[in-house]
Amino acid sequence: MGVIEDVYEDLDTDVDFEEFEAAVEDKVEQMGGLADEETAAMLIAHELRDQEVEGIADVDPGMDDVKFLAKVMRVGDLRTFERDDADDDGRVVNVDVADETGRTTITMWDGMADDAVDRLEPGDTLRVAGRPKDGYNGLEVDVDKAEPAPDAEVDVESTDSHRVEDLSLGLSDVNLAGRVLSTDTVRTFDRDDGSEGRVSNLVLGDPTGRIRVTLWDGKADLATEFAAGETVEIVDGYVRERDGTLELHVGDRGTVETVDEDVEYVPDTTDIGDLELGETADVAGGVIETDPKRTFDRDDGSEGQVRNDRGHPGGAVGREGRPRHRPRGLRRVHRRGDPRRVAGRPRSLRGVAIHSQRYGRRARGCHRHGGRGRAVDRRRRGGPVDRPGCVQRRRRERRRRGIRGVVAPER
């Protein structure tokens, strides 16, 4: 066995020996006799180790060149463009590929693009070599070489439709069916070029999760055509990221259509006591009290609406399902005649509890009726209670001081 074969045997790669041997011979020629076959083989092996990645998840835009195995999920449309320094038009096509670790877009140019459109089908397996970069839709790989690998196994299911859990940043031509959870009004905004844009939103859910859908310009009115509970399908959407959360966008190429099927959405609920600041959550419970709907002005000049509901066993959820910094509402409301035992004797507790939106405090014990004036942390259940007269007096005092509070009426 020769030195090239020895180096190749120690190399864990999908490259054929004939291709490896040819690369070694080219390397010897390039170095003009400064390296023998063994040295050239070791250099090629080093380059292959640097380029080979375990999966798409390991590909980074900072890499010079990468090689990976992936399955074709979608072949885009062939597009043409004018070159600055040539008379003939250029051609380009984007191909979505995936493996067990992730998904990305590979870009093929000119003759390679023509071959891709004519020969590639979803489900084909490719061995890709190219240069990663940050593209408009996220990570992209400019392909230098792509070869069919029919004998290789990539355990990814190719499909024409998606679920919420399948979405990833940069994904395009997304078709997704889901149940409408909420709709929004059409809003306008000014673009940098002085033109007026239009935007609206839907929230869709399917058995795997939920996603916010953003409809732009001519598609914005579609949000007003659907109601919560209907089943619709997003056609030719694309995935973007906003504030660390994935969103599905619909532009001129896409649309939203009603479909005659039932898509189930069952949210995973979170206990109110387990809510954390900044997270989006679903909660379930009994409604204790509701506030009237209020309107407010957004920064972009549009008008918004909001309403607060308070539920048992405590806490509240604010606009868009996000927990407030201090959960509003009452952990426990003592009703008139509710028997409690203190030192072995039954006792009837009367009164109500107060929670301050500004300070996050509960009712203080009343000196006039034997309380100790101790502030109770909002996370504790129960605590000192006041008689109705004291509540009214302190509520007037709070109004005079300009502090808003939430009072649960005596029951």
Image (spheres, rainbow, N blue to C red):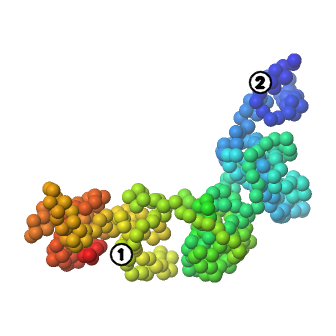
Residue 35 percent across, percent down from the top left: 82, 23
The total number of labels drawn is 2
Residue named by callout 1? 289
Q: What residue is pinned by disc 2? A: 10
Residue 353 seen in the figure: no
For residue 111, side relative to residue 361 (left or right)? right
- Alpha-carbon span between mark 1 and mark 2: 72 Å
In the rendered structure, the answer to whether residue 252 lies left or right of residue 244 reads: right
The quarter of the image holding the C terminus is: bottom left
Residue 376 appears in the picture as rendered: yes
Disc 1: CA contacts within 10 A as few (<14), some (14-19) or many (>=20): few
Nearest the viewer among 144 and 171 is 171
Which quadrant: the N terminus?
top right
> 54 or 387, which is in the foreground?
387
Q: Which residue shows up at 60% across the image and 72% down it? A: 180
**Quadrant of the image occupied by residue 191:** bottom right
- Identify which amino acid the numbered label 1 is placed on: Glu
Helix, strand or loop at label 2? It is loop
| Residue drawn 45% across the image and 70% down it | 319
Foreground residue among 233 and 170: 233
- The image position of residue 34, as x and y in percent, is 82, 23
Q: Which residue does the image show at 76% across and 61% down from the upper left?
A: 160
Closer-to-camera residue (401/47): 401
Which quadrant of the structure image shows residue 358? bottom left
